[in-house]
Image: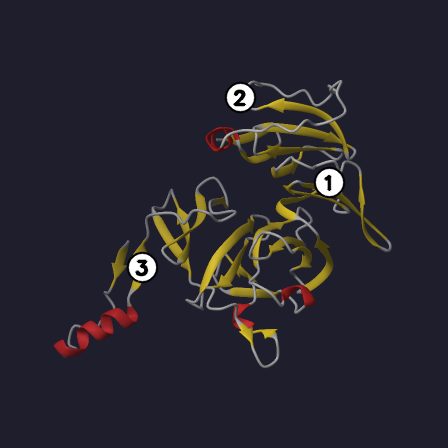
Amino acid sequence: MFLDDSFVDPSADDSNIETLLYSNIKPKFVFGLVTGISGNCLYLNDHVIVYPAAGVVVVHDLDAHSQRFVYPKDPRRTITAMDLSPMSYVLAVATVAENDGGGHDDDKGKIEDYAKPIVKIYDLESLSEKHVFVEPEGEWQKFGQRRFTKIRFQNDNVHLAALVVGDDGSDCGFYFYGWRNSKVETYIRIDGFVADVAMNPFDLSLCCFAGREFFQFMTKTETGWSQYGFREAEGIDFTCVCWLCRDRCLAGTTDGRVILFKNGLFQSMYYVDEVHDIDVTIKSKSENLSIIILSEFEMKSKSVRSCIAFEYGLIVVAG
C-alpha cells in the first residue's frame, strides 16, 4: 500500500508531526485482495474493477492507472459480500460486526444495532452512501450472529436479493429488497444449510436455493412463496447454482458434478473432470441422483466452486 501524507503541514512542530500523520493518513494506491468474500472481484466495465483490500473497497481504473476508495465508516465491521449494478452505477457492500460475544443486549434480549448484518449501497460516481438495509429484528436472531453471504442486484434495476445465514450456516433467510425505495418486498425463512441462491433473471417470481443436502425451487404466488419441483437432495451437497435460461438452471456439487434442471425437475448430470460440452436438450435415462462418497482430498480437487452463465456460454470453476 502506498500512503499519501502530502497534506501534513510541514511547519508543524516535530512533536506533532507523527500524530498528524497517523490521524490523517490515507491510502493512495492499494495492492492485494481480500479472499473468502462473495463478489470480491467485480467488473464495472472493461477497464474498471472493484474489489476489497486493506479495509477499503478499491475502484481501480486499469486504463488511467488510478484508484479511488470506498471507506467503511465503522472499523468494527467486516465485509462479507459485494455486488454492483453497472446500469445504475451503484455498489452494494454487506458487512457484519466482529463477534464480541454475540452483540446482544442482555437486558432486553435484542441484538445491538451495530451487531446486525447490514447492506450499504454506494454511488460509484461520488462514492457516497445512498441507501442502508439493516436486517429487521426477528425471533430467529436471538441466538448467534448472522451475516449476509450473497447479495445480488437483479436485472430489473430495482431489486437486490440478499441471503443471510446464522453462525453455523443454518437458520437462513432470503430478502428481496427494493433498494431504490428502501423497502423489503418479500422474505423467506429457509430451514436448511444454504450455500447459494439464484433468482431467475427472466422471471423474478422464480428462485432456487442450493446447499448442504438442500435444494429447493420456489415460486411466488399471490399468497406468498411455495416450493415446487425437485427436492431429493439427501446425501448431496450443492455448492452453487445459476439459471441458464427461463426454464433451465445448473447446480454444482462438492463431488464434482454439475446437474441440469428443467422446469424444476432433474434433466441430466455431468462430471466436470470428464465433460467438455453440455447439451441442455439431452435428458438422462436415470431419474435419480446417487450418493458419491469421496475422501477429503478428492472433495477439494473436484468440488464445483462456481457456475456462471453468460450470453455465449457457461463458466464452471472446480477444484
Compared with 156, 315 (above or below) is above
Q: Position of residue 36 (x, y in %)?
A: 46, 47
Instruction: Tell me which amino acid carries mark 2.
Output: Asp
Q: Is residue 50 visible?
A: yes
Q: Earlier in the sequence, mark 3 or mark 1?
A: 3
Q: Is 33 on the left or on the right of 157, as rendered?
A: left
Q: Is residue 9 visible?
A: no
Residue that badge 1 annotates: 202
Q: Position of residue 294 (x, y in %)?
A: 54, 29
Q: Is 2 on the left or on the right of 168, as rendered?
A: left
Q: Earlier in the sequence, mark 2 or mark 1?
A: 1
Q: Which class describes the residues within 10 Å of circle 1: few (<14), some (14-19), or many (20+)?
A: some
Badge 1 marks a residue whose secondary structure is: loop
Q: Which class describes the residues within 10 Å of circle 3: few (<14), some (14-19), or many (20+)?
A: some
Q: CA distance from mark 2 to mark 1?
A: 30 Å
Q: Earlier in the sequence, mark 3 or mark 2?
A: 3
Residue at (62% x, 53% y) in the render? 170
Instruction: Tell me which amino acid carries mark 1.
Output: Phe
Camera-side residue of 316 and 319: 319
The total number of labels drawn is: 3
Residue that badge 3 annotates: 27
Residue 236's image quarter? top right
Q: Position of residue 48 (x, y in %)?
A: 44, 45
Residue at (63% x, 38% y) in the render? 241
Q: Position of residue 80 (x, y in %)?
A: 50, 54
Badge 2 marks a residue whose secondary structure is: loop
Compared with 226, 246 (above or below) is above
Residue that badge 2 annotates: 273
